[in-house]
Amino acid sequence: MIGAGRYRTHAAAGAAEAVGEAVRVSGWVHRRRDHGGVIFIDLRDRSGIVQLVFHPEQAPEAHAAAERLHLEDVICVDGQVVRRSEETINPRIPTGEVEVAVSAMERLAETEPVPFSVEDESTEPSEELRLTYRYIDMRRPRRLAALELRARVVRAMRRVLDDDGFLEVETPVLTRSTPEGARDFLVPSRLSQGEWYALPQSPQLFKQLLMVGGLERYYQIARCFRDEDLRADRQPEFTQLDVEASFVEPQDIEDLTERVLVACFAEAGIEIPTPFPRMGYAEAMRRFGSDRPDLRFGMEIQDWTDAAGRTDFAVFKGVVDGGGVVRGLVVPGAGEGVSRKDGDELMAEAQALGAKGLVWAIVQDDGTLRSPVAKFLDGLAADFGAAPGDLITLVADDEQVASEVLGTLRNRFAERWGLIPEGMWAPLWVEDFPLVGWNADEKRWDALHHPFTAPHPDDIDLIATDPGSVRSLAYDVVLNGLEIGGGSIRIHDQAVQKAVFACIGLGADEAEDRFGFLLKALRLGAPPHGGIALGLDRLVMLLAGERSIRDVIAFPKTATGADPLTGAPAGVDDTQLRELAVRSTAPSPEEREK
Ligand code: ASP
């Protein structure tokens, strides 16, 4: 054992197997009880907790020293492991049947009062405080458990991939922009003033070049950097398992990914069945209003367009005549107690999501509907298979808006009305994505995955004529409504690559300027290849049962991208800026005050 001899013969948890032995253990003072005589201290190290007993008569010196200990002091003790008496056994901890009768103690570090309790996990300090003192926070068993799980998950990934002949390769962090659709973090070059490195949004182009280089099977636990507004649960730097292989089809990557995920889940004691179900993008949008459907519950989106078109309700008729749709959801058992005011709030919620409005109805005991527009909803309950007590919501809009709004409401309603089963895991593959999507703001087509994704071989001719209908060879792996990974078969033919660049508005010159190195590589013997990336942070979050990825990252950033521990990001010296030939136009702190 590391540190054996000078600091320890056993880890705290190891004491349980050392009854009768003389031991030396080191760690933190986790808890302290002084009964005016014998002093009990719970000693904590990474392995767990063991109780120390200081007897005033048997070890007066150690006992006197123990009187002066504070919580979280670091100590080293010698003693003998003894069985506890029957009444003092603590069944809640693995070492609960033993204790260490201390003969000598050395204090290795005396601590100031800590900013929050390590021992009492029932009180949760503010996140700001926890992140400022992350090194205290991670002493708490729950944080430690998340980091341990994370390490085991990474080990499991490596195990599966190593066994399959994958080679772990590092790719540069100082590089050129890789377009994954986010903003780059830039690093000024001192040696070539006026030029900039970009931090990689992913190792995408390098892993493709590794395939051209004949490596055939690559993986990396890769750090990626995306300068996005940190809405929801994002981090400016995050980790992904990045994989690429040559001579593969989607099925090969999907099978491999499932084996990796099964091994990762096993680390959390969870069994997931394979193969994962597969669903096309169009079907996912139609049935669930999302390209990452949560399959832990039903509540599928249903279509009522035809019937709605036959009603006398002007709102429905207008939408249907204009080519739109009327679709809805049944929320089982949610109708009870829904007042007119609640209904108005549902309407406002749908409007905030972009819908023109929302119609709500409650199925009453006699099967009739209670709704402000009940008279137009004849037959709706039967058509939707709704039962007394159910809430029905309808959205009339163009197809995309209706789908997306209902998709969001579906998730929210399931959560709000407690319809998501506990402890259930619902993975699936979503496939057959469109290659590009229309960017209405910029009036151009954008790659839906990234511009290196291969179009479906049957659709290649449509790239020039009807880009919106081209399918891609991309696939996403989704778990409980969260995308945990995505990848694709790549373009390995430079003519196709050029056509896709042209389609997304990247002119020949610009394409050559930014991606000439890739186009050249594709002309020099590029094998067919494809891969995937799995988001490690989110995966571990799900497996650990945490709600934020910040809880499974050792030193995460806050929602504004700041690190309260180190104070990053921070200003730099003018000298440093001069060396880089960079001048800041940001207002000085004094100017900002004004
Ligand atoms: N580079 C992609 C990403 O980071 C994943 C892939 O296509 O393999 O999302």
Image (cartoon, rainbow, N blue to C red):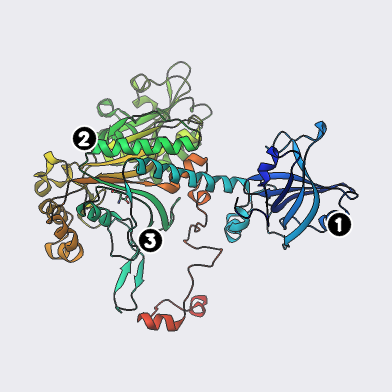
Is label 2 or label 3 in front? 3
Instruction: Residue at 34%, 66% (x, y): give it.
Output: 174
Query: Where residue 227 is drawn, which disc sits there?
Result: 3
Mark 3: C-beta under 8 Å from nearest atom of ligand 1: no
Secondary structure state at the residue bearing disc 1: helix
**In the rendered image, is residue 314 in sight?**
no
Instruction: Residue at 38%, 45% (x, y): give it.
Output: 353
Instruction: Residue at 43%, 84% (x, y): give it.
Output: 575
- Tell me if 514 is positioned left or right of 16 in this view: left
Residue type at the position of mark 1: Glu
> Would you call the spot at circle 3 few (<14 residues within 10 Å), some (14-19), or many (20 or more)?
some
Give residue 576's position: percent from left, percent from top: 42, 80
Query: Where residue 137 is drawn, which disc sits there?
Result: none
Sequence-wise, which precedes: disc 2 or disc 1?
1
Give residue 551's position: percent from left, percent from top: 53, 49
Question: Residue tagged by mark 2?
Answer: 321
Sequence-wise, which precedes: disc 2 or disc 3?
3
Measured in 3D between alpha carbons, the distance from the residue under mark 2 to the one under mark 1, in whole angstroms, is 91 Å
Is label 2 or label 1 in front? 1
Instruction: Please identify the quarter of the rendering in which residue 18 is found.
Output: top right
> Would you call the spot at circle 1 few (<14 residues within 10 Å), some (14-19), or many (20 or more)?
some
Residue type at the position of mark 3: Asp
Question: Residue tagged by mark 1?
Answer: 61
From the viewer's side, name the closer residue of 293 and 207: 207
Is label 1 or label 3 in front? 1
